[in-house]
Image (cartoon, rainbow, N blue to C red):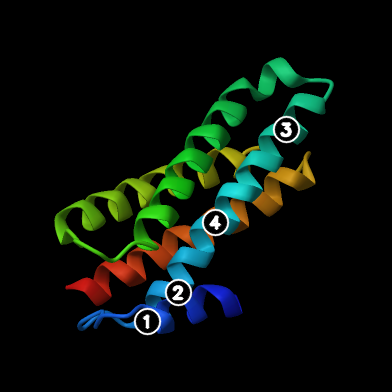
C-alpha cells in the first residue's frame, strides 16, 4: 500500500467516521494504479500491428482509465462527503473494470500488456467491491 495514500488519510483534520481507512486506502491505490495501467495498455494496443482489431480494447481501456481516475480522486476528498455519490462511483468503477478486464482477457494470450491490464482491472474491481461492502 502506498505510504502517501495512507498518510494523507491519517492527516485529514476531521474524523472520517466509520470508514475503514485500510479498505479506503487500498481502493484509492487500486483506482489510480488501474487508471495508469489502462492508459498504458491502450497506448500499447495502438502500437500493435493489428491495431484495428484492438479498437474495442483501446476504447474500453480509455473509458476504464477515466472512470478509475475520477473514482480515485473523489475517494481522496472527504469534506462534504456524499455517500450516494461515492456508492454510485464505486459501482460504475466496478462495471468499467469488469468490462475492461473481460475485453483485455480476450487478447491476453497474444498481448502481454492486455494480461497485465486485466489483472489490474480485476484488482480494482475487487477493491471497489470491498469498499462498497465496508460502507454498508
Residue at figure coordinates x 48%, y 34% from the top left: 63
Q: Nearer the viewer, mark 4 or mark 3?
A: 4
Is there CB contact under 8 Å for labels 2 and 1?
yes
Residue corresponding to mark 3: 43
Tag shown at residue 25: 2
Residue identifier under label 4: 32
Mark sitting on residue 8 = none
Question: Is label 4 in contact with label 3 (beta carbons under 8 Å)?
Answer: no
> On the rendered structure, is 113 left or right of 120?
right
Q: Residues within 10 Å of mark 4 (few under 14, many from 20)?
A: many
Secondary element type, mark 3: helix
Residue 70: tell me if it is visible: yes
Marks 4 and 2, how far apart at CA: 11 Å
Q: Gap in Å between the C-alphas at discs 2 and 1?
A: 6 Å
Up the image or down, 38 lies above or below 63; here it is: below
Q: Secondary structure at mark 2?
A: helix
Q: Which residue is mark 1?
A: 21
Q: Along the horizontal axis of the image, is 63 left or right of 54?
A: left
Element at badge 4? Answer: helix
Tally of marks: 4
CA gap between label 4 and label 3 equals: 17 Å
Residue drawn where x is 75% and y is 45% of the image: 113
Query: Which of the two discs, 2 and 3, sits closer to the camera?
Result: 2
- Tell me the distance, in whole angstroms, between the alpha carbons under discs 3 and 1: 33 Å
Q: Label 2 to label 3, Cα distance in Å?
A: 27 Å
Of pointers 4 and 2, the one earlier in the residue sequence: 2
Amino acid at each position: 500500500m502506498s505510504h502517501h495514500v495512507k498518510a494523507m488519510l491519517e492527516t485529514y483534520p476531521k474524523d472520517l467516521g466509520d470508514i475503514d481507512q485500510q479498505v479506503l486506502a487500498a481502493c484509492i491505490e487500486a483506482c489510480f494504479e488501474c487508471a495508469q495501467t489502462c492508459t498504458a495498455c491502450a497506448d500499447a494496443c495502438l502500437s500493435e500491428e493489428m491495431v484495428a482489431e484492438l479498437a474495442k480494447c483501446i476504447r474500453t481501456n480509455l473509458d476504464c482509465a477515466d472512470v478509475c481516475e475520477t473514482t480515485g480522486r473523489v475517494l481522496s476528498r472527504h469534506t462534504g462527503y456524499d455517500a450516494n455519490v461515492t456508492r454510485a462511483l464505486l459501482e460504475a468503477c466496478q462495471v468499467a473494470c469488469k468490462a475492461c478486464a473481460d475485453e483485455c482477457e480476450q487478447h491476453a494470450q497474444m498481448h502481454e500488456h492486455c494480461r497485465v491490464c486485466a489483472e489490474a482491472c480485476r484488482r480494482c474491481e475487487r477493491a471497489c467491491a470491498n469498499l462498497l461492502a465496508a460502507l454498508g
